[in-house]
Image: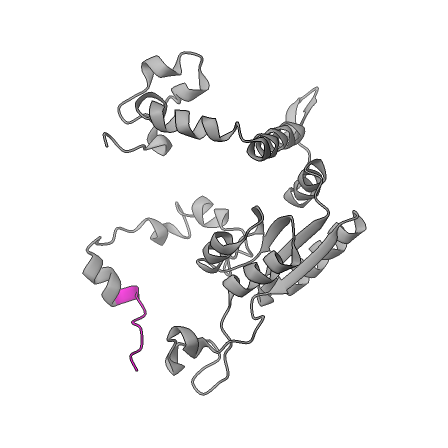
């Protein structure tokens, strides 16, 4: 297996230089995972992957413009999504959204439809499946014990959009874990427009920026013993 990649701790990313194979530090994947990278690069030879990657790279290039005072960004992410979808020739787009970001999904849909796309949108509660289906107790219902509380069903969202034949999916505010399930079950490629963050107005990077001041508690050290994690954080499945 060798050393694990820890690129985030690299002080001199040699992968940006011409001679990167020679000078990578211990654990550098560019130096030590040559066979894995070779396999990955072969994937780009597949026509559909080649074109997707090519257009994504062009999209990245077009996100910047050079001004006399220096290079600057030019497009917000929502514009990038529109431009990339057009580059790929997509006509039917899927929008999978959280009920808490309905307004954002509505605005996005208007933008996409105004730009000529056919948009299929599915909210997380589609199907109105009770939370009890996945072992949620009365005390664990957000609306309180005794309430009717439908679960979020990202698998249903994905399957509905699969059934509609969408060519590209856009996630709008799905919760942590729900987004993972959607991506797992979606047939068409997925991009994320909005990431759920209830505290920072769906800007999770704010937690990183504030980790040295108001949210320094994010950097606290905790035990890694799995039994401790299960006891303190895991929801135990209900029997019966």
Q: Name the residue rendered at 78%, 47% in the picture.
A: 115
Residue 141 visible within the image: no
Where does residue 90 sit, x and y in percent of width and height? 70, 44
Q: Is residue 34 magenta?
A: no
Q: Which residues are magenta?
A: 232-240
Say which residue appears at 30% left-offset and 82% top-offset: 240
Seen in the picture, residue 150 relative to 96 is either above or below; the reply is below
- Seen as rendered, the residue at the extreme bottom is 146
Residue sitting nearer the eye, 210 or 30 = 30
153 on left or right of 236? right
Residue 129 horizontal side relative to residue 29, left or right: right
Picture quadrant where residue 231 is located: bottom left
Q: Residue at x 59, y 35 (%)?
A: 48
The location of residue 176, given as percent across then percent down, is: 45, 58
Whether residue 121 is visible, yes or no, is yes
Q: Give 93 or 98, whichever is nearer the viewer.
A: 93
**x, y percent for residue 54:** 60, 29
Is 199 placed left or right of 116 in the picture? Answer: left
Q: Quadrant of residue 226?
A: bottom left
Which SS type dominates the magenta stretch?
loop
The answer to if 237 sits in the magenta stretch is: yes
Q: Nearer the viewer, residue 231 or 170?
A: 170
User: Is residue 18 shown above or below 76?
Assistant: above
């Amino acid at each position: 297996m060798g050393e694990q990649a820890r690129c985030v701790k690299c002080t001199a990313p040699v992968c940006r230089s011409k001679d990167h194979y020679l000078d990578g530090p211990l654990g550098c994947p560019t130096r030590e995972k040559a066979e894995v990278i070779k396999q990955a690069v072969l994937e780009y030879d597949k026509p559909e992957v080649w074109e997707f990657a090519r257009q994504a790279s062009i999209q990245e290039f077009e996100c910047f413009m050079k001004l006399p005072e220096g290079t600057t960004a030019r497009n917000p992410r929502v514009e990038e999504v529109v431009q990339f979808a057009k580059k790929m020739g997509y006509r039917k787009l899927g929008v999978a959204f959280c009920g808490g970001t309905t307004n954002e999904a509505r605005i996005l849909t208007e933008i996409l439809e105004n730009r000529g796309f056919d948009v299929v949108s599915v909210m997380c509660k589609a199907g109105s499946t009770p939370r009890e289906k996945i072992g949620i107790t009365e005390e664990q219902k957000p609306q309180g014990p005794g309430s009717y509380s439908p679960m979020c069903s990202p698998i249903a969202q994905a399957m509905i959009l699969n059934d509609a034949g969408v060519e590209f999916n856009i996630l709008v505010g799905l919760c942590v874990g729900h987004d993972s399930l959607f991506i797992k079950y979606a047939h068409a490629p997925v991009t994320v427009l909005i990431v759920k963050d209830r505290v920072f107005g769906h800007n999770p990077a704010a937690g990183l920026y504030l980790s040295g001041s108001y949210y320094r508690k994010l950097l606290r050290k905790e035990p890694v013993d799995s039994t401790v994690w299960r006891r303190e954080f895991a929801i135990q499945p209900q029997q019966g």
